[in-house]
């Protein structure tokens, strides 16, 4: 799993500090169903009105929503677990992660059941470790 800081760096485009992973300019709040699977009054990931598990779309199927370095699905589709335990977010750090212990882990990205506000790169949520829901998933991270 990526740490929360790693996930945030990728989603915001590093120094660009994007509002959404695809935002250009960085402060742009442009959001359409072509960029992410999310709830906008109805779930539209599968193109059919109404919310269903079919709104969880295949990874990479919305390339206009890709991040600065080509990562797909950094907003919407699935909430993504991070390595960090829940706590206050550290805004300035080097190699930081809250990996001690806790009961809840941090989730980022929003899901196909989430509204536009939760898809913003700065939004964070936590859930008890081991929670299972149709809109929770993982992203693999690799260190160079």
Image (cartoon, helix red, strand yellow):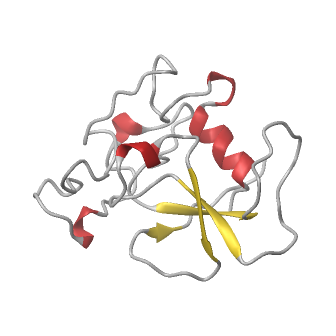
In the image, residue 28 sits, relative to residue 111, either above or below, namely above
Residue furthest front in the image = 88
Among the 4 quarters of the image, the one containing residue 135: bottom left
Residue at screen point 84% across, 75% down: 101
Residue 127 shown left or right of residue 65 in the figure: right
Q: Is residue 138 left or right of residue 41?
A: right
**What count of labels does the image hold?**
0
Tell me what residue is drawn at x 57 percent, y 61 percent. 139
Please identify the residue farthest to the top as the structure is shown.
25
Q: Residue furthest left?
A: 49
Q: Is 52 in front, or is 115?
A: 115
Asked whether 9 or 133 is in front, the reply is: 133
Location of residue 131 by image quarter: bottom right
- Decide if residue 99 is on the left or right side of residue 124: right
Q: Position of residue 128 (x, y in %)?
A: 62, 78
Locate residue 140, reporting x and y percent.
62, 61
On the picture, is 15 further left or further right than 112?
right
* Residue 10 quadrant: top right
Query: Is residue 85 positioned above or below 39 on the image?
Result: below
Residue at 59 percent of width and 34 percent of height = 12
Looking at the rendering, in which quadrant would you find the N terminus? bottom right
Expressed as whole percent of the image width and height from the top left, the position of residue 67 reads 51, 36
Q: Residue at x 20, y 53 (%)?
A: 44
């Amino acid at each position: 799993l990526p740490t929360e800081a790693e996930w945030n760096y990728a989603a915001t485009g590093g120094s660009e500090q994007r509002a959404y992973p695809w935002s250009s300019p960085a402060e742009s709040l442009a959001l359409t169903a072509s960029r992410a699977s999310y709830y906008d009054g109805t779930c539209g990931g599968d193109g059919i009105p109404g919310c269903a598990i079919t709104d969880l779309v295949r990874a990479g199927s919305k390339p206009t929503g890709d991040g600065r370095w080509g990562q797909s699905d950094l907003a919407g589709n699935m909430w993504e677990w991070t390595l960090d335990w829940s706590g206050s977010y550290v805004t300035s750090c080097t190699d930081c992660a809250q990996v001690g212990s806790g009961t809840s882990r941090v989730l980022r990205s929003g899901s196909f059941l989430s509204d536009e506000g939760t898809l913003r790169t700065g939004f964070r949520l936590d859930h008890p470790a081991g929670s299972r829901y149709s809109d929770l998933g993982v992203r693999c991270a690799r260190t160079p």
